[in-house]
């Protein structure tokens, strides 16, 4: 079968791209291994809520129209939103269709899916940035008596054995799951490496309002000082709750969660934590305050100081001087380790030499320059800092569909 373009993945990114291709009358097909929003249906834990506010969950041709713009969507509502969006877009789609191979072919690409071969002049990879858990090598040294989980296999605290839980990673996933597991009555130790501290609200506005208003989310990938670092930055320590509470290390300590430094090594069954937790926290505080200063300056320039409550600063992260540096994983105290150490994409089925030695696709703002006609969408800081979030797909899909259109036209001439 022949089509002009194939989009792989029917998450929000693939659906946004389908909309953009339709706008440009480019004949295409969206291939999806599950149903629309498959990642949200099958790979996220049920109590997850978006950390971005509802008003920001906008896609090309679709704004949030519910009655709770300042709330945070539970997973089920994300699935419902994307399912409605797929209908709105009218995406030409084949679900339950797993792409096994994409390879170069005369005039474009060959896509092998469910035993069929499709030919397309352009391919858009929208298969997600979070298909697999990123687990550090130290995991190999965990004693077999300890149960290990990842955010992809975690569903609820009831599935964990009794005993203390070590959550490794204090970014959005880690702080949320540490709090949830602690509330279930299990003691929790949270190993915190480098993290991004942000308050949920500042001067009576949600932090994402400030991130958008100050222009930070609009910063382009080719203007960011250290792009590799920006693309690998941990997610902010934020949770979406109906009460819009801040979930930082101070909050978690006050709940009774024990905070340790970065998990560096496991030797002879003993987990060793970095002694630099105080420095790591001081750096996170400093960066948060830098952003708040930028926000205050922006508010003054925009003439909003009379409308907003006055600027203020949050208490520095308080670090217990008796923070444990070691935990014996063979003693039976720790029964579970939950890796909240990030995610990585899975493009292992891509049979085109466009990946670097870490397996990541080399691209220029989503344009895979070494394979003309191949595009990548839905990656952190793909074209702007907003690319990391759902609403960033609007600008990214527009730019890439424009490039794809020009590419097809130039080949036609
Ligand atoms: C825990 C977590 C919380 C997040 N919270 C937020 C948030 O609060 N706000 C926000 O804006 N963003 C959030 N994100 C980030 C981002 O919005 C999501 O990662 C989003 O799902 C990415 O959308 P996508 O369309 O790029 O990929 P996905 O939603 O992952 O969609 C990719 C699709 O491709 C399909 N697919 C994959 N491989 C194949 C194949 N070989 N063949 C066919 N189909 C395939 C998958 O089944 C899937 O449906 C969060 C991410 C995670 C992991």
Image: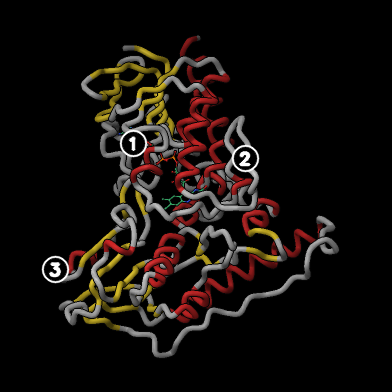
Chain-order first, disc 2 or disc 1: 2
Query: How does the figure colour the protein chain or chains?
Result: secondary structure
Of the two numbered discs 3 and 2 in the rendering, the one whose residue sits closer to the viewer: 2
Are discs 1 and 3 less than 8 Å apart at CB?
no
Q: Badge 3: few (under 14), some or many (20 or more) residues near its Cα, within 10 Å?
A: few
Residue lying farthest to the top in this orientation? 413
Of the two numbered discs 1 and 3 in the rendering, the one whose residue sits closer to the viewer: 3
Q: Quadrant of residue 293?
A: bottom right
* Image side of residue 149 versus residue 401, left or right: left
Q: Position of residue 21 (x, y in %)?
A: 52, 22
* Image side of residue 315 versus residue 3, left or right: right
Chain-order first, disc 1 or disc 3: 3
The residue that mark 2 highlights is 64
Q: Toward the viewer: 70 or 113? A: 70
Rounded to the nearest angstrom, the CA distance separating label 3 from label 2 is: 47 Å
The residue that mark 1 highlights is 354
Q: Position of residue 227 (x, y in %)?
A: 50, 51
Local secondary structure at mark 3: loop
The residue that mark 3 highlights is 144
């Amino acid at each position: 079968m022949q089509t002009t373009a194939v989009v792989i993945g029917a998450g929000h990114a693939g659906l946004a791209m389908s909309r953009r291709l339709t706008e440009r009358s480019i004949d295409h097909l969206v291939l999806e291994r599950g149903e629309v929003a498959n990642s949200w249906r099958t790979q996220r834990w049920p109590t997850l809520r978006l950390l971005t506010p509802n008003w920001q969950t906008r896609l090309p041709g679709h704004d949030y129209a519910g009655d709770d713009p300042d709330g945070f969507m539970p997973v089920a509502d994300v699935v419902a939103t994307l399912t409605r969006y797929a209908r709105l877009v009218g995406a030409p789609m084949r679900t339950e269709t797993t792409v096994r191979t994409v390879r170069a072919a005369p005039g474009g690409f060959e896509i092998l899916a469910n035993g069929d071969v499709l030919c397309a002049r352009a391919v858009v990879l929208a298969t997600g940035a979070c298909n697999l858990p990123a687990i550090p090598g130290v995991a190999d040294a965990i004693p077999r008596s300890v149960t290990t989980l990842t955010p992809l296999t975690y569903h609820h605290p009831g599935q964990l054995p009794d005993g203390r839980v070590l959550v490794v990673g204090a970014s959005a996933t880690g702080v949320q799951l540490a709090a949830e597991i602690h509330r279930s009555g299990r003691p929790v130790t949270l190993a915190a490496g480098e993290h991004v501290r942000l308050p949920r609200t500042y001067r009576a506005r949600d932090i994402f309002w400030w991130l958008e208003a100050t222009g930070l989310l609009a910063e382009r990938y080719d203007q960011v000082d250290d792009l590799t670092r920006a693309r690998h930055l941990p997610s902010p320590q934020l949770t979406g709750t109906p009460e819009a509470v801040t979930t930082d290390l101070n909050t978690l300590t006050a709940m009774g969660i024990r905070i340790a430094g970065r998990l560096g090594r496991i030797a002879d069954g003993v987990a060793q934590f970095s002694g630099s937790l105080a420095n790591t926290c001081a750096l996170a505080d400093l960066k948060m305050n830098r952003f708040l200063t930028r926000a205050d300056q922006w508010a003054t320039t925009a003439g909003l100081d009379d409308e907003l409550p006055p600027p203020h600063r949050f208490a520095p992260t308080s670090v217990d001087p008796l923070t444990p540096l070691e935990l014996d994983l063979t003693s039976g105290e720790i029964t579970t380790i939950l890796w909240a150490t990030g995610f990585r994409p899975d493009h292992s089925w891509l049979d085109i030499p466009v990946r670097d030695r870490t397996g990541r696709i080399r691209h220029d703002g989503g344009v895979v320059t070494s394979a003309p006609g191949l595009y990548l969408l839905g990656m952190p800081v793909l074209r702007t800092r907003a690319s990391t979030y759902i609403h960033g797909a609007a600008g990214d899909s527009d730019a890439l569909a424009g490039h794809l259109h020009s590419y097809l036209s130039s080949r036609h001439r």
